[in-house]
Image: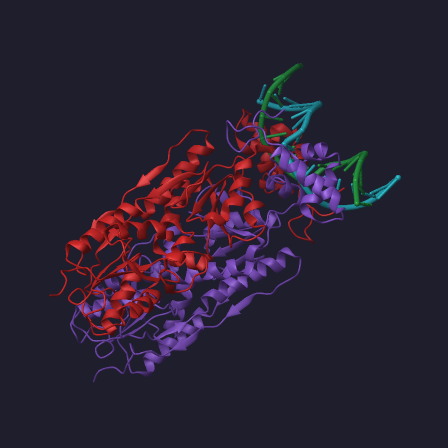
Chain colours: A purple, B red, C green, D cyan
Amino acid sequence: MSANNQPHPGATPRPTLADVAKRAGVSGSTASIAFSGDGSISAKTRDRVLAAAEELNYAGPDPRARSLRQGRSGIVGVILEDRVLHSFRDPMMIAALDGISQQLGDSGGMLLLTSNGEGESTIQTAVFDAAIFMGCSPHLARSIEIMRQRNVPMVAIEGQAFAGVLSVALDNREASVTLAQVVHDLGHRRVATITLPLDSLRERRPLTDELVRSATTATTLDRLEGAREVYPALTGVVAANSSTDEGMAAALVLLDAAPELRPTAIIAQSDLLAVGAIRAAESLGLRVPGDLTVVGFDGARIEGMNDYDLTTMVQPAMEKGRAAGFAVTELLAGRSVGDVSLTSVLHIGNTSGPVAQ
Amino acid sequence: MSANNQPHPGATPRPTLADVAKRAGVSGSTASIAFSGDGSISAKTRDRVLAAAEELNYAGPDPRARSLRQGRSGIVGVILEDRVLHSFRDPMMIAALDGISQQLGDSGGMLLLTSNGEGESTIQTAVFDAAIFMGCSPHLARSIEIMRQRNVPMVAIEGQAFAGVLSVALDNREASVTLAQVVHDLGHRRVATITLPLDSLRERRPLTDELVRSATTATTLDRLEGAREVYPALTGVVAANSSTDEGMAAALVLLDAAPELRPTAIIAQSDLLAVGAIRAAESLGLRVPGDLTVVGFDGARIEGMNDYDLTTMVQPAMEKGRAAGFAVTELLAGRSVGDVSLTSVLHIGNTSGPVAQ
DNA sequence: CTGTTAGCGCTTTCAG
DNA sequence: CTGAAAGCGCTAACAG
């Protein structure tokens, strides 16, 4: 017999449904129905069962046993590729998580799992019925393979396309073309970009072709490719993360040049980075948009922008989460769902203007 | 026999460990050891088992079955009293969540559960081994009772004291006394406060004794009581949530008075609220701290404060999470842990100054 | 409306 | 080092 089947050592043995049934003088199945409510039962019998439960201090059916028996746990795994803190500092990520949680409602919880992309991860041993990847990279191929074998429905938000993983995508490429075109139409020709990280290394570096070739983050690449459709030779700096501090540091590098060589516009891949770039410009005595045009991406409403209204592409971040949550629910119900593609909207603010003569 | 024990309808039947064992020509227990690694097994046998698994496309032991058998799932439930979005917008909450996740490491995931405080919640049916409450109110009494019956270790971060729930507390009261004393020492006598919500209603209202009596949020009360130790008659506005928008709206109400009646200082219960109050002052043409002293609470580093450096109590937010994560780990290991009490540190910035003559 | 029966898939003694 | 047996606690047929 098992010596210790308690959640932690030192616990006293808990009564089981069978104990309750015995005490109430009914069968196990009847007792089960008294708790679950599906199946018919007379009010009197149910009350008797519940009373017996009360007397024994029975806490209700054990979720673990129930989940084995039913084959479902009600848990949706949400796989983040980064430390929780970084993910949580990204407003788009938060909005998406909220969207997921709205859609799942009270019918289940979100199990947050992080993946460092290395070795055996909890992803392979954790209890959940479906998975949502947020910005997943090729590192996860092994985990995805395992979930596929387990028939766990998977949805990826803005990730690499994987076979068998439903995709909730954003028009990163097209939106970036639109935005770059706006900059181009304003006459800017010396333009630089600040991109999101290209891989899991997370350090600030000049943007090189080599880095691009070894990149693992789809969103970054898509946005870059879009901008390069308008500015084929576009170069700049890869940020270590999406924050104003990084944006500022990166922009300081880009703006450290003689006026006639300095970029007249910066295309930042996120609004946080863009705000940092504006700060950098201010600190150098440059005016936005007079001396420097700055555009972002996301449509995050950032505190403390004062009179700046960022020119950016507004992405439906919460909608991404809702779509993923909905898809997962449908897949779990055995219904089929198609890939989702979401569209960003151009917002012209006051941080972009014609190139100075 | 059970008709459908798949995570979702339409799934094909998965091989089980027993199938793998049979194919490898070993017993179930041996196959189990091949995967779990505990127990001794010859390399040759293990390879044979793994090969058989490969051939059958076996994904590894089913987490649900394993969790029933072992009595543990590796999941820690994190119970938020609010919508995920609201929780995630609170920088202190995010820091605490990150602290938890750091401490848990890869050994398990965080299952985020929200409670509206009503009826049967997922909390009672979800699979997890231990629970961490973040800012829990009396609403959760029933769920707590059930977890107690299940012998689920519980830790509350800044919540009401519940029997059997380990407490990770902050010195909200004492810290508030300190801060109020600073304001008092600067000579301020007409002082108002902007508090965090007092209950789950979440609407902006004047602070009344009646509201205080029916309050359910411990943190808010503690901070208020601390301030009232210095300003016994302190009154003001209850914010609907902790955000700069709310802080601004609340402050506009407080500052809408003739100069000789208007408060000369505002004690905000969070930094976000304080920043909002500063914005309100600016919008009314009042200078901070010349015309109005504003103090906050938290030590959140808020973007866009420009030259303001908020006078506040800096709380160890990430540490709260780490302490809770550590406690939970210890409790699950059967070791005993005591309550934790954390201390905030006064930070004098430039938003507080002597009362105008 | 209630009881009987048969496992869910796994791990863990305990013998060999 | 390996195998046999015994459940973890519950729920879903199915029969009465």
Q: How many marks?
A: 0
Quarter of the image for residue B284 reads bottom left
Query: Residue A76, position in %: x, y?
Result: 55, 52
**Which residue is depicted at the point 41% across and 63% down?**
A92
Viewer can see residue A193: no
Depth check: give the residue in front, B81 or B99: B81
Q: Is residue B54 above or below residue A205?
A: above
**Quarter of the figure with the C terminus of chain B:** bottom left
Query: Residue B96, position in %: x, y?
Result: 37, 48
The answer to whether residue B145 is left or right of residue B310 is right
Depth check: give the residue in front, A140 or B268: B268
The answer to whether residue A187 is left or right of residue A282 is right
**Which residue is depicted at the point 42% across and 59% down?**
B86
The answer to whether residue B116 is left or right of residue A354 is right
The answer to whether residue B256 is left or right of residue A301 is left
Quarter of the image for residue B286 reads bottom left
Residue farthest along the left direction in this orientation: B357
Q: Is residue A243 above or below residue B47?
A: below
**Which residue is depicted at the point 47% across and 60% down?**
A98
Q: Is residue B104 above or below residue A268?
A: above
Query: Residue A183, position in %: x, y?
Result: 32, 78
Viewer can see residue B96: yes
**Quarter of the figure with the N terminus of chain B:** top right
